[in-house]
Image (cartoon, rainbow, N blue to C red):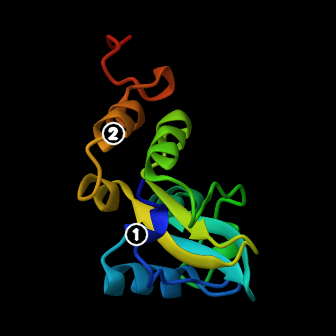
């Protein structure tokens, strides 16, 4: 079985919790991504997405000089680089995420894995994609208008 280390992207860009939102947004633009791991030293302390910036900063009137820590999610889901692809696909489906930071057994960031990384390598990814893309009641937009 293939391991996550066989398919992950190794050059994951990091931001620091004390960096500005503008710094994070510029880095997202440079690497054409919508999510960045947040690291304090060699410790993974959060994740920040373009949606986090929009909802937790801009919508609340915070400007580009706000800190990443003001917008990031502190709960970090991750996988280990030596895990089997099938296991990680199942986990991604269960927790409904499209990307996961990849850490070594010392919990140091070594990369990031996305659905697109998995799709290119594994036929079993269709199951994960189906689970991740399933609608939840919280975001159901098909309800009739009141």
Q: Residue at x 62, y 58 (%)?
A: 78
Q: How much space separates mark 2 and mark 1, taking CA atoms? A: 19 Å
* Residue 27 showing in the rendered view: yes
**Location of residue 11 (image quadrant):** bottom left
Give 123 or 60, whichever is nearer the viewer. 123
Q: Is label 2 in a helix, a strand or a loop?
A: helix
Q: Residues within 10 Å of mark 1 (few under 14, many from 20)?
A: some
Check the picture and name the quadrant holding the C terminus. Answer: top left
Residue 118 location, x and y as percent?
Answer: 33, 55
* Residue 57 showing in the rendered view: no
Q: How many marks?
A: 2
**Location of residue 32 (image quadrant):** bottom left
Q: Nearer the viewer, mark 2 or mark 1?
A: 1
126 to the left or right of 77: left
Q: Is label 1 in a helix, a strand or a loop?
A: helix
Q: Residue at x 40, y 75 (%)?
A: 9
Q: Which residue is drawn at 36% across and 72% down?
A: 33
* Vertical placement of residue 30 versus 77, above or below: below
Reading the image, the residue beneath label 1 is: 6
The numbered dot on residue 129 is: 2
* Vertical placement of residue 73 versus 86, above or below: below
């Amino acid at each position: 079985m293939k391991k996550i280390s066989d398919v992950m992207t190794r050059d994951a860009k990091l931001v620091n919790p004390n960096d500005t939102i503008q710094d994070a947004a510029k880095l997202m633009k440079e690497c054409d991504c919508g999510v960045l791991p947040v690291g304090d030293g060699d410790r993974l302390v959060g994740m920040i997405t373009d949606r986090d910036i929009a909802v937790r900063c801009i919508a609340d009137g915070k400007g580009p000089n706000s800190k990443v820590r003001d917008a990031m999610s502190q709960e970090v889901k991750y996988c280990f680089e030596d895990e089997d692809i099938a296991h990680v696909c199942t986990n991604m489906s269960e927790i409904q995420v499209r990307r996961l930071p990849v850490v070594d057994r010392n919990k140091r960031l070594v990369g990031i894995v996305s659905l697109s990384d998995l799709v290119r390598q594994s036929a079993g990814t269709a199951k994960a994609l189906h689970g991740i893309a399933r609608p939840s009641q919280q975001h159901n937009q098909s309800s009739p208008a009141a």
